Image (tube, grey):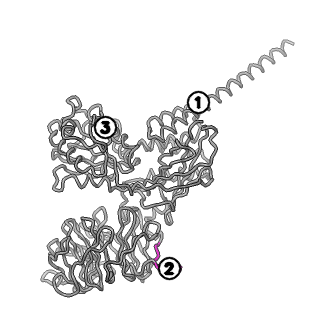
């Protein structure tokens, strides 16, 4: 009897222990879920540090919860800590079913983030370019355009097509939708051939049979003519390709007269060159032309060479003397190299060395490609005259990796009305622009959402937000007058921009009290006070990293076009990168679509770390006293590209009184490429 009693007592003890253990497990799960909810809410209001702490606490209670690891990785990523993000995503990927949608999406994200190298893709460095799609000139007996000879991509993702056969300009969007047509004055265009844009936004269109060049406004509306048909000065016989140099002068390939003619931006004839001379044998069949940095490059598709001239028309030798089969058009790339169409080949040529690299083939050698240009999304657009289409060439690596889609945040305050902010990039972190409602499909738990509405794209907006970061080092103690000039110039070019904050980067970076109007424009006395700063804000141990993050963080909840303007001596101090390295700072800015513009005061050389940050985030370095001033660079902030898009929809999911975690999936399609992302939200508690 005593033995039986002892057994009952032991069993009762073990049972109680199991119950207590279960209660502990349940309490851990509840606490973890509460922390997870706080983290998700913090993430969706851009409080990434708070989100990291909450997700880490949630994992301390439930370390095997895969979703928590994935969200912690997201918060690290948005904070610029990509190494930590990759670690968390790797844990999550290894614990998902390897064939599941979650595992496949994470694997793609991990690979893309690991392989990133630069902000802008380098044509020819990402492997060959292959055909990824076409915009046909005719389909189902409907004609959109005929015999295209040139393309002019625009910053908003649209493209002007020069339609030689149908005597018109056609404006087309990323999805091939025709948005506008321009046919010129009353008498119309007469075999338009090439189109370029001048420095002031006006466009110039050569008319091959008309023997003239039309001047158009930025929207393609006809303004007037340059030249006429003939063989005299300022006249043409079959004008073809065009170029505009960095001073705004226009160069016209006068094909029939076998020469190049130069005009000022208003169409006044300057001189012609390229005919036979003691130093130059003369053109046989001039075709493509490009102008930059005081050099004019002209292709000849009979001699199969590319010749070099200076801005005065003096022959300077050959860039390419052999290896070409029939060059047609020349276009400068962002990095200063030349993109050359050579029959059905796409080539890249180094202007310094003349080294030629083939980067792609279009169709076969019977295809007549007359022009190629790089679009805003990194594709190469080619005009195929014979096939009557615009071909799209995409890097092999980009084709393989698809689109990098990111749900930036979900706003559920007005549930069931949901607002979703989405960013779309390629593998090199270049924003994909020009998309609309046709490119997006949103679902919740596999169900289509209702009332999916496209609100707008970040690139379309004409507003921007900026924060100003002022270096408070020993070097800038004597540069307060220069800093004041910089602030005045920034103030004078705020068109469409709002100043969110001014941060002094001392040993402990602080926000300055700014007194301005609703746009943040300073008064003259306010500018002087900001330029001087407080005496104790200056330090030889000033913190660039903390100051930059503070200035950038203020921008997160503002316009999608945003930038930090850094007023600097050009040199970073000994503690400038004490807590965050250049890679972390670059990732923080780039992952949150913030560009860095550095305004250099004092005339000292600029440290490479500053140049790197500006280049990698889409900004630039400008000298306060350069000839053109800092105005053009500051105004460029409003024109910067953004791959952000906003949608609203009505949710049909049950909320469990606001306690349910509701996942959202976004799929994006663009021609032969696609990408998707999943994020979730908690509706308001009822």
Which residue does the numbered mark 3 point to in the structure image?
A: 547
As drawn, is 451 to the left or to the right of 83? right
Q: Is residue 257 visible?
A: yes
Residues tagged 3 and 2 counted as in contact (Cβ below 8 A): no
Cα separation, mark 2 vs mark 1, equals 63 Å
- For the residue pair 571 and 52, the one nearer the viewer reads as 52
- Magenta span includes 473: no
Coordinates of residue 23 in the picture (x, y in percent): 67, 26
Q: Element type at marker 3?
A: helix
- For the residue pair 580 and 439, the one nearer the viewer reads as 439
Label 3 neighbour load within 10 Å: few <14, some 14-19, many 20+: many
Q: For the N terminus, which image quadrant?
A: top right
Residue 31: assigned label: 1
- Magenta span includes 141: yes
Residue 142: assigned label: 2
For this orientation, the residue located farthest to the left is 278
- Give, as a single range, the part of the protein colored magenta: 134-143
At 57% from the left edge and 50% from the top edge, which residue is drawn? Answer: 650
Question: In terms of sequence position, does the residue under pointer 3 or pointer 1 come before the other?
Answer: 1
Label 2 neighbour load within 10 Å: few <14, some 14-19, many 20+: few
At 43% from the left edge and 64% from the top edge, which residue is drawn? Answer: 395
Question: In terms of sequence position, does the residue under pointer 3 or pointer 2 come before the other?
Answer: 2
Q: Element type at marker 1?
A: helix
Question: In terms of sequence position, does the residue under pointer 2 or pointer 1 come before the other?
Answer: 1
Residues tagged 2 and 1 counted as in contact (Cβ below 8 A): no
As drawn, is 418 to the left or to the right of 548? right
Cα separation, mark 3 vs mark 2, equals 58 Å
Number of marks in the rendered image: 3
- For the residue pair 220 and 300, the one nearer the viewer reads as 220
Coordinates of residue 195 in the picture (x, y in percent): 31, 74
Q: Quarter-wise, where is residue 542 in the image?
A: top left
């Amino acid at each position: 009897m005593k033995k039986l009693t002892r057994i009952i007592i032991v069993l009762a003890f073990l049972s109680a222990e199991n119950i207590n253990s279960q209660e502990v497990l349940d309490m851990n799960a509840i606490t973890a879920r509460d922390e997870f909810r706080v983290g998700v809410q913090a993430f969706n209001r851009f409080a990434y540090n708070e989100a990291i702490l909450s997700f880490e606490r949630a994992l301390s209670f439930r370390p095997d919860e895969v979703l928590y690891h994935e969200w912690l990785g997201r918060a690290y990523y948005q904070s610029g800590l990509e190494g930590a993000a990759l670690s968390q995503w790797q844990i999550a990927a290894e614990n998902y079913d390897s064939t599941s949608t979650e595992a496949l999406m994470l694997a793609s994200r991990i690979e893309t983030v690991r392989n990133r190298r630069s902000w802008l893709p380098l044509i020819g460095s990402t492997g060959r370019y292959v055909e990824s799609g076409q915009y046909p000139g005719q389909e189902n007996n409907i004609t959109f355009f005929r015999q295209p000879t040139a393309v002019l991509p625009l910053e908003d993702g649209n493209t002007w097509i020069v339609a030689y056969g149908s005597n018109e300009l056609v404006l087309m969007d990323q999805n091939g939708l025709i948005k506008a047509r321009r046919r010129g004055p009353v008498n119309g265009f007469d075999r338009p051939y090439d189109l370029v844009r001048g420095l002031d936004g006006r466009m110039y269109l050569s008319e091959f049979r008309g023997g003239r060049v039309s001047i158009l406004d930025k929207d393609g509306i006809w303004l007037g003519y340059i030249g006429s048909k003939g063989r005299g000065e300022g006249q043409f016989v079959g004008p073809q390709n065009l170029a505009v140099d960095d001073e705004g002068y226009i160069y016209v390939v006068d094909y029939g007269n076998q020469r190049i003619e130069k005009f000022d931006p208003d169409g006044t004839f300057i001189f012609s060159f390229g005919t036979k001379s003691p130093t130059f044998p003369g053109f046989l069949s001039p075709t493509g032309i490009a102008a930059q940095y005081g050099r004019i490059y002209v292709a000849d598709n009979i001699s199969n060479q590319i010749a070099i001239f200076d801005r005065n028309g003096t022959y300077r030798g050959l860039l390419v003397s052999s290896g070409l089969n029939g060059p047609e058009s020349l276009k400068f790339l962002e990095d200063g190299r030349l993109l050359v169409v050579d029959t059905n080949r796409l080539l890249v040529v180094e202007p310094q060395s003349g080294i030629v690299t083939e980067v792609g083939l279009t169709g076969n050698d019977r295809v007549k490609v007359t022009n190629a240009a790089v679009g805003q999304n990194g594709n190469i657009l080619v005009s195929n005259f014979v096939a009557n289409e615009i071909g799209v060439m995409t890097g092999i690596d980009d084709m393989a990796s698809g689109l990098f889609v990111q749900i930036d945040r979900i706003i559920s305050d007005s549930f069931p009305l949901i607002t979703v902010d989405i960013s779309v990039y390629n593998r090199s972190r270049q924003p994909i622009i020009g998309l609309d409602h046709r490119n997006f499909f949103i679902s919740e738990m596999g169900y289509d959402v209702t009332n999916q509405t496209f609100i707008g794209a970040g690139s379309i907006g004409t507003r921007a937000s900026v924060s100003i970061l002022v270096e408070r080092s020993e070097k800038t103690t004597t540069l307060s007058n220069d800093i004041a000039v910089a602030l005045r110039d920034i103030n004078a070019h705020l068109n469409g921009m709002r100043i969110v904050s001014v941060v002094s980067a001392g040993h402990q970076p602080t926000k300055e009290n700014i007194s301005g109007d609703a746009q943040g424009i300073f008064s003259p006395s306010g500018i002087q006070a900001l330029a001087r700063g407080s005496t104790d804000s200056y330090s030889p141990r000033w913190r660039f990293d903390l100051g930059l993050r503070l200035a950038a963080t203020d921008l997160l909840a503002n316009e999608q076009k945003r930038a930090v303007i850094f007023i600097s001596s050009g040199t970073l101090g000994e503690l400038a990168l004490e807590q965050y390295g250049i890679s972390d700072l670059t990732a923080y800015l780039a992952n949150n679509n913030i560009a860095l513009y550095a305004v250099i005061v004092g005339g000292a050389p600029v440290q490479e770390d500053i140049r790197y940050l500006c280049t990698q985030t889409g900004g630039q370095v400008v000298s306060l006293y350069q000839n053109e001033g800092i105005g053009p660079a500051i105004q460029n902030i409003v024109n910067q590209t953004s791959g952000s898009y906003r949608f609203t929809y009505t949710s049909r999911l049950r909320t469990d009184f606001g306690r349910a975690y509701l996942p959202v999936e976004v799929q994006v399609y663009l021609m032969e490429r696609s990408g998707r992302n999943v994020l979730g939200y908690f509706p308001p508690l009822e």
